Image: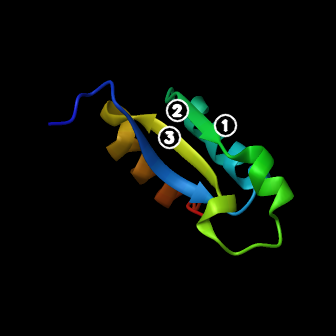
Amino acid sequence: MKNENDIVLAATFSDAAKASIAQGMLENHGIKSMLSNELISNIMAMGSADFGRVRLSVFQRDLDETMRLLKEHDDIG
């Protein structure tokens, strides 16, 4: 059973700039998020593996609203 305070993966992005834009949009809507793999994404920019993608995570309680906003703003990478 998932806890509303669990941190869950919401989306992945091909580069840190796109992820930061999405994170800022979420912040403007009151949703806290965390980015991971920004450095690896920059180093592995030419790779196509998921390994180098920037991950945007949110609290479970915010996941539905996050997905709605990302789709609405075309920010899903």
Residue 18 falls in image quadrant: bottom right
Nearest to N terminus: mark 1 or mark 3: 1
Badge 3 amino acid: Ser
Badge 1 amino acid: Gly
- Residue nearest the viewer, comparing 77 with 47: 47
Q: Residue at x 58, y 49 (%)?
A: 55
Residue labelled with disc 3: 57
Q: Residue 46 placed where, x, y %? A: 83, 72
Mark 1 vs mark 2: give the one in front.
1
Q: Residue 4 placed where, x, y %? A: 27, 28
Would you call the spot at circle 1 few (<14 residues within 10 Å), some (14-19), or many (20 or more)? some
Question: Mark 1: which secondary structure?
Answer: helix
In the rendered view, would you say 26 is above or below 41? above
Tag 3 and tag 2, C-beta contact below 8 Å: no
Instruction: Report how far apart the C-alphas of labels 1 and 2 lie in the structure.
Output: 9 Å
Residue labelled with disc 1: 24
* Residue 29, numbered circle: 2
Q: Residue at x 23, y 28 (%)?
A: 3
Nearest to N terminus: mark 1 or mark 2: 1
Instruction: Report how far apart the C-alphas of labels 3 and 2 lie in the structure.
Output: 15 Å
Q: Quadrant of the N terminus?
A: top left
Q: Residue 54 placed where, x, y %? A: 66, 52
- Residue nearest the viewer, comparing 49 with 56: 49
